[in-house]
């Protein structure tokens, strides 16, 4: 069984709880969990913002005027950042982290058994209750164990 969850949404604890109760009820099923990667370019944008955040913080702390390299006059907000380094770096760090978190937050909790999707929080909008999940697993296992009575039937 594979469970893909949104790490930034705090679903790791939910995964651990569900993995434990599934292992208790179905010891023959191994539960594997992994982070659900965000869709599209969100991960790349998040990484670029993180990289840019670190460069800007290093420029602020070192007092580098990046606008001199671009042959542009230094704006007032950059002068403020250089004068208030600690506050500017903290603000840059927390603002960039908030944007990065929004980009990578998928809200996913996807459950599949033998590559058969059992539950999708992205589609239903909620995480299944344990009895509900047990019912779905039982039905899937029962269906997969059924033998076709006459495979030569046309």
Image: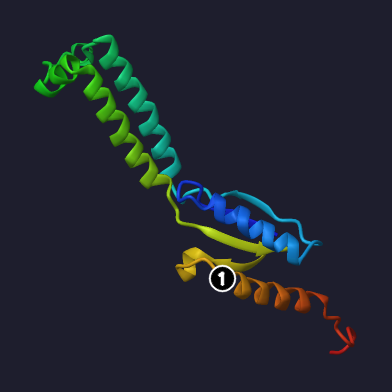
Q: Give the x, y percent position of residue 127.
A: 52, 66
Is 20 left or right of 40, judged from the image as shown?
right
Is 6 left or right of 84, judged from the image as shown?
right
Quadrant of the rendering where the C terminus is positioned: bottom right
Question: Do we see residue 53 in this rendering?
Answer: yes
Q: Quadrant of residue 111?
A: bottom right
Q: Is residue 17 above or below residue 56?
A: below
Q: Is residue 79 above or below residue 20?
A: above
The total of numbered circles placed on residues is 1
Q: Give the x, y percent position of residue 68.
A: 18, 11
Q: Give the x, y percent position of residue 39.
A: 46, 51
In this view, the residue in front, 14 or 42, is 14
In this view, the residue in front, 121 or 148, is 121
Q: Give the x, y percent position of residue 75.
A: 11, 21
Please report the residue visible at 33 percent of the width from the left and 27 percent of the height from the top: 53
Please report the residue visible at 52 percent of the width from the left and 48 percent of the height from the top: 37
Please report the residue visible at 23 percent of the width from the left and 12 percent of the height from the top: 69
Is 135 left or right of 122, judged from the image as shown?
right
In this view, the residue in front, 27 or 102, is 27
Residue identified by numbered label 1: 129
Please report the residue visible at 60 percent of the width from the left and 75 percent of the height from the top: 132
User: For mark 1, does the 10 Å Cα neighbourhood hold few (<14), some (14 to 19), or many (20 or more) residues?
Assistant: few
């Amino acid at each position: 069984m594979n469970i893909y969850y949104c790490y930034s949404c705090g679903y790791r604890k939910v995964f651990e709880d569900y993995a434990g109760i599934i292992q208790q009820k179905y010891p023959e099923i191994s539960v594997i969990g992994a982070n659900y990667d965000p869709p599209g370019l969100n991960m790349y944008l998040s990484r670029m913002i993180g990289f840019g955040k670190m460069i800007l913080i290093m420029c602020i702390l070192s007092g580098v005027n990046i606008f001199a390299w671009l042959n542009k006059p230094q704006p007032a907000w950059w002068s403020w950042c250089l004068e208030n380094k600690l506050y500017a770096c903290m603000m840059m760090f927390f603002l960039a982290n908030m944007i990065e978190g929004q980009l990578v937050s998928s809200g996913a909790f996807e459950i599949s058994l033998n590559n058969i999707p059992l539950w999708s929080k992205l589609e239903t909008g909620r995480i299944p209750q344990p009895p509900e999940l047990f019912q779905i697993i039982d039905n899937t296992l029962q269906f997969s164990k059924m033998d076709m009575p006459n495979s030569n039937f046309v």
